[in-house]
Image: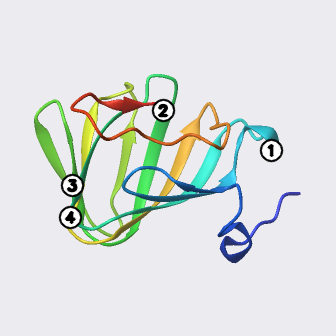
Amino acid sequence: MIVNELEKIINTERDIEWGNGRSRRFLIEKDTMGYSLTDTTVTANTESLLEYKNHKETCYCIEGEGEVEADGVIYPIKPGTMYALDQHDKHYLRAKTNLRLVCVFTPPLKGHESHNLKNNVASEY
């Protein structure tokens, strides 16, 4: 059995600055569950152009407000909203306020991945 607590992840190698927030990684590849589970924060008033060519991702919002845009369609995000990037979708993630998302990646993240958001190309891993 694997048991972990957020306060034990903070400030460890599983607490990653991903580009416009933090990703606290409860489960990663070496945990051998076949998926990753993260508690991800997105900083208010940020926009991130993302694309996961090697992973599918599902996010469930538990705090804050924002939006995700894919193929020109904008979907509002608020507590209780789930979105799944089932086609390796290139997307914009915009945070109107600080967002907090519970995210699942398959296949699992190795654990150290972060984004390069300094250019106008989608950041990927």
Q: Which residue is mark 1?
A: 31
Badge 3 amino acid: Glu
x then y, percent, for residue 17? 50, 55
Can you name the residue that lies furthest to the front here? 118
Q: CA distance from mark 2 to mark 4?
A: 25 Å
Q: Secondary structure at mark 3?
A: strand
Q: Which residue is mark 3?
A: 67
Say which mark, if any, is on residue 48: none
CB-based contact (under 8 Å), mark 1 and mark 2:
no
Q: Which residue is mark 2?
A: 56
Q: Which residue is mark 4?
A: 45
Side (left or right) of 7 relative to 56: right
Ranked by sequence position, the earlier of labels 3 and 2 is 2
Ranked by sequence position, the earlier of labels 3 and 4 is 4
Residue at figure coordinates x 51%, y 23% from the top left: 54
Residue at figure coordinates x 51%, y 29% from the top left: 55
Side (left or right) of 108 relative to 48: right
Q: Residues within 10 Å of mark 4 (few under 14, many from 20)?
A: few
Ranked by sequence position, the earlier of labels 4 and 1 is 1
Badge 1 amino acid: Asp
Q: Residues within 10 Å of mark 1 (few under 14, many from 20)?
A: few
Residue 88: which quarter of the image? Answer: top left
Is 3 situated above or below 111?
Answer: below
Q: CA distance from mark 1 to mark 2?
A: 18 Å
x then y, percent, for residue 99? 35, 67
